[in-house]
Amino acid sequence: MLGLIARRLLTASLALWGIATLVFVLLRMLPGDPARTMLAASGASEMAIAQARQQMGLDEALPAQYGRYLWNLARGDLGRSLFSNRPVLVTLAEQLPSTLELATAALAVTVLLGLGLGVLAALYAGSWLDRMAVGIAVLGVSTPLFWSGLLLIGLFSLVLGWLPASGAGSWQHLVMPAALLGFVGAAPLARLIRSNLLTTLQADYITVARSKGLPERLVVFRHALRNALLPSLNLLGLQAGFLLGGTVVTETVFARPGLGRVVVDAILWKDLPVIQGAVLWIASTYVVINLVVDLIAMVLDPRQRKT
């Protein structure tokens, strides 16, 4: 068990190192000079640009830049913004609570709605309830986020006047973006739970439980649903990573602060250190959450401890 955990930790560490290296290489391949970009608006001279390049370490050889880059990452230093001159880590940390709030609410909607639709579709397979649940799931997967967000704003803000159209600060501001993201995330979860639950209900141990005279509700929710939910952990991990990484489209449509808005602004202003820090945060979130999901699955399912 401990050896398996150590291997998973080593794999996650190697993945993080590979991501950091890939980000370094890709940003160095982008056209343009970060020092020139930073000083272009001020009309700085070539000498000032050269001094800025020296201060940023851009005049060093690539291996030296790469070594300093990894050393700074190990110390938690993501650099400074080219335009605000603030530490990138501080900029991301300021926006994290808003993204975390939205991600938590959206994930709760995903679990409740996905679990409800999936169980309903499995218990009434082939009926109109099953077709309705599957139809809702397909609708959630196929509808673009920006279009659905604009429809919600038009209906609940402009027509009915129930909820604010944009911004943050109260639970009313959270309802529409969380419901939108939760609905989209619930669609694949519902389909996966339906498929797994239908397969589990045909297992031999479920037949034995029914033959003992156990109530159907007890058979489904105590025996079948627990095993049917295990394969859904990986999907929930991916959903959580996507949400914590910053939901760019949703935060832009609803004009919410968050990591997604930081990424959009950094791309528009070509603020490479902020882009680099945001990409590293998003990728690291995926890796860490998937590691946690793997460890939870190992605890819940002893069969996975042998892999």
Image (cartoon, rainbow, N blue to C red):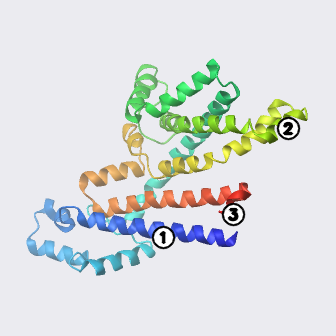
Looking at the rendered structure, the secondary structure element under dot 3 is helix
Numbered mark located on residue 14 in the image: 1
Under mark 3, the amino acid is: Lys
Q: Earlier in the sequence, mark 2 or mark 1?
A: 1
Please, is residue 6 above or below residue 305 in the view? below
Q: Secondary structure at mark 1?
A: helix
Vertical side of 296 occupied by 194: above or below: above
Residue marked by disc 3? 306
Residue at 40%, 23% (x, y): give it. Answer: 158
Determine the CA span between mark 2 and mark 3: 27 Å
**Sequence-wise, which precedes: disc 1 or disc 3?**
1
Tags 2 and 1 touching, CB below 8 Å? no
Q: Residues within 10 Å of mark 1 (few under 14, many from 20)?
A: few
Residue 297 on image: x %, y %: 66, 55
Percent x, y of residue 215: 86, 31
Residue in the foreground of this view, choosing between 59 and 13: 13
Along the line of sight, the residue nearer the viewer: 264 or 237: 237
> Crowding at label 2, few (<14), some or many (≥20) Cα neighbours within 10 Å?
some
Separation of residues labelled 1 and 3 (CA atoms): 22 Å
Residue type of the residue flagged with mark 1: Leu
Name which residue lies at 10% across and 75% down: 47
Q: How many marks?
A: 3
Sequence-earlier tag: 2 or 3: 2
188 versus 150 height, above or below = below
Residue denoted by label 2: 209
Q: Secondary structure at mark 2?
A: helix
What residue lies at 41% left-to-right and 72% top-to-bottom? 73
In this rendered view, identify the residue nearer to me: 238 or 41: 238
Q: Please state the horizontal and vertical placement of residue 122, each as a whole percent of the image.
A: 67, 30
Q: Which mark is residue 39?
A: none
